[in-house]
Image: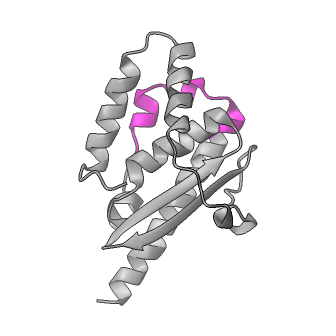
Amino acid sequence: MDTGKTIKEIEQALIEDFAMFENWEDKYEYLIDIGKKLEPLDPIYKKEELKIKGCQSSVWVHSYLKDGKVFFEGDSDAIIVKGLVSMMIMVLSGQKPAEIVHAELGFINSIGLSSHLAQTRSNGLRSMIKQMKLEASVFEGLQSNNQ
């Protein structure tokens, strides 16, 4: 999804969306709703080498480079984690590799996810971000080698 918005703009929109909810039960419901909107991942990408290591549930992320931008697709077998995958795709997909690699992703703390996720989910989210940034870094290297 290429919205034409910067990572910071997308992060700010998510912060504002989550701010509309007063309690964490409602915020989790919103996160689940975000996950329900995630496009289904083609089963050919649900393979072991695309599985995020460090996640308790099964999480797959596939990336590709198109027109100088990185696009992500993903899925999970857990509903809250699927929401996390979807949210990270919303923020990072359609951005230039260098922007992804250097993104601070402060929205995670701003919306309170860090303190409200179970330790295993929090570790999984960090692993997912690390993997997405790693893939963007590979694409960044490929681009600089082709110039």
- Provide residue 115's location: percent of width, then percent of height: 56, 25
- Provide residue 28's location: percent of width, then percent of height: 56, 23
Residue at 49% x, 24% y: name it: 30
- Provide residue 29's location: percent of width, then percent of height: 55, 21
Task: Examine the image and state in which quarter residue 98 appears.
Answer: bottom left
19 relative to 103, above or below: above
- Provide residue 126's location: percent of width, then percent of height: 58, 47
* Residue range highlighted in magenta: 105-122
Residue 112 is a magenta residue = yes
Dominant secondary structure (helix, strand or loop) of the stretch shown in magenta: helix
Q: Nearer the viewer, residue 82 or 139?
A: 82
Residue positioned most to the bottom: 146
Residue at 35% x, 59% y: name it: 94
Q: Please state if 11 lies on the left or on the right of 42 as rendered.
A: left
Q: Please state if 53 lies on the left or on the right of 93 as rendered.
A: right
Give the color scheme: rainbow, by chain, secondary structure or one colour.
one colour
Q: Nearer the viewer, residue 61 or 106?
A: 61
121 relative to 28, above or below: below
Residue at 30% x, 33% y: name it: 13
Residue 73 is a magenta residue = no
Task: Examine the image and state in which quarter residue 118 appears.
Answer: top right
Q: Please state if 119 lies on the left or on the right of 16 as rendered.
A: right
**Which image quarter is the N terminus in?**
bottom left
